[in-house]
């Protein structure tokens, strides 16, 4: 009965919000302009989150569906504080088997030949390409090689308008050599270098350097995804031609862990594609819809698959977790972890070169 009441409340909210937020807005000159579709979704659900979030808390355990205690931000789309995130990564790294024997060759070895028949085997696909956190699920109905490889990601270049947005939910993430003598050793520097590389390849790129994890002069990662949503939906409203959204992060690992590969003779930080699935093991999270989930999965998988043949050892397994992480705004959205706090800035910057190549190949349809 309680579940039915919750669903009815959600339905009523959506009806009311449809009335509250029209599909078009007026510009300063009075002209009518259609809202960006993602912006309309943002408006409707953000109002519900802020106003009625308490209605969807579990009454039995004192926790909501994502395990947060009463009093915490119920609809936060983040990985928690830095301390929480790094502790979690320490536990997950061993459990997820990043050191397991891999299908893929080590640096300098000949690339493995993978057949479509192998990829169509669900168990093979999941074992060799993905790490799945306990907060989510990735079933056979969703993880299909035909969909992952067959979804078209090609984007015709138009240098006249922005088509790619790079931003950083956690702009304050730094590398091992960060300090007063090297204040540029942050993930934002990586984002700017990636933007330059993509521009050199003919793409029109916006690099948003907004500090979404600083509020009131203090580091606040607990609500950074909410603040970032404010920022990037505004950018999309002004630049609706954007079709690619990249959220660059720096991971947190044990201090003894070094995420290093050799790419074109350079010490290069490993990268990891990170997916928010908008679902728990029990099913989809209704109040965190992602209409582009399949496209997101295909976008990252196509880059991952290309990387394993072109740059063996450069990528870690694709990581799947339960929430949404603002990946619902465009079909070509990706959250990318670039190395960790134990990498140097130069290693992280080196990682941008193969990443730019992979992005360009997938977007060009190669």
Image: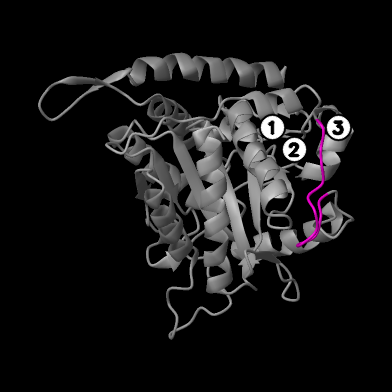
The reply, left or right, for residue 179 in relation to residue 281 is left
User: Is 34 inside the magenta-drawn segment?
Assistant: no
Marked residue nearer the N-terminal end (2 or 3): 3
Name the residue that disc number 3 marks: 118
Q: Are marks 2 and 1 in contact (CB under 8 Å)?
A: yes
Q: Is residue 92 above or below residue 165?
A: below
Residue 118 lies, in percent from the top left, at: 86, 32
State the SS at label 2: loop
Query: Marks 2 and 3: which is nearer the front?
Result: 3
Q: Are marks 2 and 3 in contact (CB under 8 Å)?
A: no
Residue 251 visible? The answer is no
**Crowdedness near tag 2: few (<14), some (14–19) or many (≥20) residues, C-alpha within 10 Å:** many
**Crowdedness near tag 3: few (<14), some (14–19) or many (≥20) residues, C-alpha within 10 Å:** few
Q: Residue at x 29, y 36 (%)?
A: 161
User: Is 114 inside the magenta-drawn segment?
Assistant: yes
Q: Residue at x 72, y 54 (%)?
A: 316
- Kindly identify which numbered label has been placed on residue 279: 1
Residue 99 visible? The answer is yes
State the SS at label 1: strand
- Kindly identify which numbered label has been placed on residue 136: 2
Viewer-nearest residue: 76 or 235: 235
Provide the residue span drawn in magenta.
Answer: 104-115
């Amino acid at each position: 009965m309680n579940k039915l009441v919750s669903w009815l409340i959600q339905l009523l909210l959506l009806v009311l919000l449809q009335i509250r937020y029209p599909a078009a807005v007026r510009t300063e000159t009075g002209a009518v302009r259609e809202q960006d579709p993602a912006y309309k979704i943002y408006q409707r659900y953000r109002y519900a989150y802020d106003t009625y979030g308490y209605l969807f808390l579990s009454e039995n355990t004192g926790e909501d569906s994502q395990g947060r205690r009463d009093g915490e931000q119920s609809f936060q789309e983040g990985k928690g504080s830095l301390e929480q995130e790094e502790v979690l990564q320490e536990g997950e790294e061993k459990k997820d088997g990043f050191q397991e024997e891999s299908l893929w060759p080590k640096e300098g070895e000949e690339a493995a030949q993978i057949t479509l028949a192998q990829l169509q085997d669900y168990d093979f696909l999941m074992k060799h390409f993905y790490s799945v956190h306990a907060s989510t699920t990735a079933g056979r109905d969703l993880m299909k090689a035909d969909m992952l490889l067959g979804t078209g990601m090609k984007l015709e270049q138009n240098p006249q308008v922005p088509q790619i947005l790079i931003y950083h939910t956690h702009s304050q993430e730094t590398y091992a050599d960060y300090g007063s003598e090297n204040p540029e050793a942050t993930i934002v520097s990586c984002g700017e270098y990636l933007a330059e590389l993509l521009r050199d390849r003919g793409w029109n790129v916006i690099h948003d350097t907004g500090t979404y994890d600083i509020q009131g002069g203090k580091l606040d990662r607990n609500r950074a995804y909410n603040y970032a949503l404010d920022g990037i939906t505004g950018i999309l409203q002004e630049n609706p031609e954007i079709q690619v959204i990249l959220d660059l992060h720096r991971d947190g690992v044990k201090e003894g862990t070094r995420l290093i590969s050799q790419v074109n003779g350079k010490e290069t930080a490993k990268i990891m594609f990170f997916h928010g699935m908008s679902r728990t093991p029990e099913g989809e999270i209704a109040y965190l819809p992602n209409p582009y989930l399949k496209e997101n999965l295909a976008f990252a998988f196509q880059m991952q698959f290309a990387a394993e043949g072109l740059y063996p050892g450069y990528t870690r397994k694709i990581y799947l977790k339960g929430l949404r992480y603002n990946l619902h705004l465009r079909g070509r959205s990706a959250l990318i972890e670039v190395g960790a706090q134990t990498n140097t800035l130069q290693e992280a910057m080196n990682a941008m070169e193969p990443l730019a190549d992979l992005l360009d190949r997938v977007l060009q349809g190669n």
